[in-house]
Image (cartoon, grey):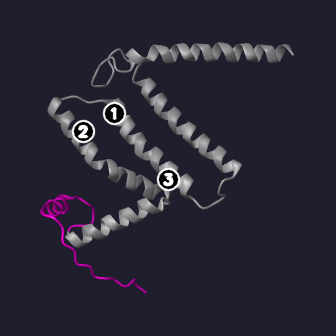
């Protein structure tokens, strides 16, 4: 049985009316459809629980205007940054993952759930890190600034060497016991 609709009549400022008219919401063209879509979005956001797929769509929508502005600036300046593209792809994914994992009602607050959450976050963070490291492989990086990554990589490489040295020492000590 379809849900019963309740009619509302509201007055909005001219600025809000112009905003609503300019708002691009897939599948919503009339003011009524746009208002229903905004209410639906607000309900999902407030509830905090949504599937990974719904969360990804929601987060993508949140960043859509920003991405369009960025692409327009890149077009106007004839610049492109893979670093920014990677980050803007990663951001909705990590937020959707958190929403899906923390919003689920299954196995609330168990140790296994927290360990799985941490492992999922580590996978995603390391994946972003690996992607950014790949940008430093070539002499000229695909970034707005050609030294964006390489100028910051040495401290990370030094930390990596220290970690390897410490792990080797601990491994040798354990072998000696």
Q: Label 3 to label 2, Cα distance in Å?
A: 26 Å
Residue designated by label 3: 99
Side (left or right) of 14 relative to 139: left
Q: Looking at the image, which residue is at 27% across and 44% down?
A: 66
Q: Label 2 to label 1, Cα distance in Å?
A: 9 Å
State the residue in front, 142 or 68.
Answer: 68
Which span is picked out in magenta?
1-29
Q: Label 1 to label 3, Cα distance in Å?
A: 23 Å
Viewer-nearest of labels 1 and 3?
3
Side (left or right) of 115 relative to 27: right
Q: Looking at the image, which residue is at 35% across and 14% down?
A: 139
Residue designated by label 2: 70
Mark found first going from the N terminus, 3 or 2: 2
Give the number of marks: 3
Residue designated by label 1: 84
> In x, y percent, where is residue 68?
24, 44
Main structural element of the magenta stretch: helix, strand or loop? loop
Structural crowding at the residue carrying mark 1, measured as other residues with C-alpha within 10 Å and reported as few (<14), some (14–19) or many (≥20): some
Mark found first going from the N terminus, 2 or 1: 2
Q: Quadrant of the C terminus?
A: top right
Side (left or right) of 69 relative to 122: left
Work out which residue is located at the far right of the displayed protein and give it. 177
Work out which residue is located at the far bottom of the displayed protein and give it. 1
Structural crowding at the residue carrying mark 2, measured as other residues with C-alpha within 10 Å and reported as few (<14), some (14–19) or many (≥20): some
> In x, y percent, where is residue 62?
33, 51
> In x, y percent, where is residue 98?
51, 49
């Amino acid at each position: 049985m379809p849900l019963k609709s309740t009619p509302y009549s509201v007055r909005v400022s001219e600025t809000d009316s112009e905003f609503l008219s300019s708002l691009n919401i897939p599948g919503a063209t009339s003011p009524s459809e746009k208002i229903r879509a905004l209410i639906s979005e607000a309900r999902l956001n407030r509830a905090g629980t949504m599937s990974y797929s719904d969360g990804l769509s929601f987060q993508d929508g949140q960043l859509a205007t920003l991405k369009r502005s960025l692409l327009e600036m890149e077009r106007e300046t004839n610049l492109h940054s893979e670093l920014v593209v990677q980050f803007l792809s990663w951001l909705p994914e990590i937020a959707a993952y958190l929403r899906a994992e923390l919003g689920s009602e299954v196995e609330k607050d168990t140790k296994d759930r927290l360990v799985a959450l941490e492992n999922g976050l580590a996978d995603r963070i390391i994946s972003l890190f690996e992607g950014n490291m790949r940008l430093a492989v070539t002499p000229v990086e695909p970034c707005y600034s050609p030294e964006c990554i390489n100028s910051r990589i040495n401290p990370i490489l030094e930390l990596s060497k220290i970690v390897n040295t410490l792990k080797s020492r601990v491994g040798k000590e354990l072998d000696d016991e």
